[in-house]
Image (cartoon, rainbow, N blue to C red):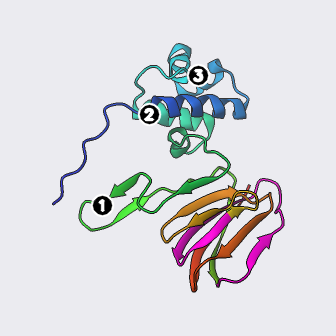
Amino acid sequence: MAQSAPLPSRPPLKSIATSLRRERGRAGLSLSQVAEQAGISKSTLSQLETGNGNPSLETLWALCVALNVPFSQLLDPPRPQTQVIRSGEGAAVPAAQAEYRATLLASSPPGARRDIYRVDAEPGTVHASDPHMPGVVEHVLLAEGKARVGTALEPVELHPGDYIAYPADLPHIFEALAPRTRAVLISEHN
């Protein structure tokens, strides 16, 4: 059996601090209100929001319940509008008993709906899309071929295994650059 990598000794405090402030602001709650609902002191929450302290898993779960957010949202730092993850990049978690690993590409925000599509494209024409409804984000994972994908002003060349997320409420494109280009497209509606 392969040895596991050592567990980190401290949680990602910067990401947690940023996420706590963001989610508390979205919920419109004060420090006192969130601390009371989570069953922790106001000073503890204040320290966590400034990136200090060493929160336990239980404390973070209690804060998630108080803020009504999934646990991953506290650990997942805010992303720029366009996000690209190249093949082989990202935080992969291996299985203990099999040659298998999962890489989180994007967590679903609360209240989102996702539609999943397989895209088959050939070179020669650019598929240009007008802006969709406000807040729509598209996620593309290229399976085969090569393509330019993303907002019309800043498309990115993708190769098999590459991932991109971009705001689809702006003009955007999908251009196959190789025969038999295939991708998975997920349209996320908030």
Distance, label 1 to label 2, CA atoms, is: 22 Å
Observer-nearest residue: 170 or 145?
A: 145
Distance, label 3 to label 2, CA atoms, is: 24 Å
**Quadrant the C terminus occupies:** bottom right
Report if the CB atoms under discs 1 and 2 are less than 8 Å apart. Answer: no
Observer-nearest residue: 75 or 148?
A: 148
Observer-nearest residue: 2 or 122?
A: 122
Observer-nearest residue: 26 or 66?
A: 26
- Indicate which disc, 3 or 2, sits on the residue closer to the N terminus: 2
**Quadrant the N terminus occupies:** bottom left
Q: SS class of the residue under badge 2?
A: loop
What residue lies at 61% left-to-right and 44% top-to-bottom? 79
What residue lies at 70% left-to-right and 83% top-to-bottom? 124
Circle 3 sits on which residue? 36
Q: SS class of the residue under badge 3?
A: helix
Circle 1 sits on which residue? 95
From the top left corner, tell me how far across and down residue 91 is, in percent: 41, 51
- Indicate which disc, 3 or 1, sits on the residue closer to the N terminus: 3
Determine which of the numbered discs, if any, sits on residue 12 in the image.
2
From the top left corner, tell me how far across and down residue 92 is, in percent: 38, 55
Q: Is residue 178 magenta?
A: no
Part of the protein shown in magenta: 122-149
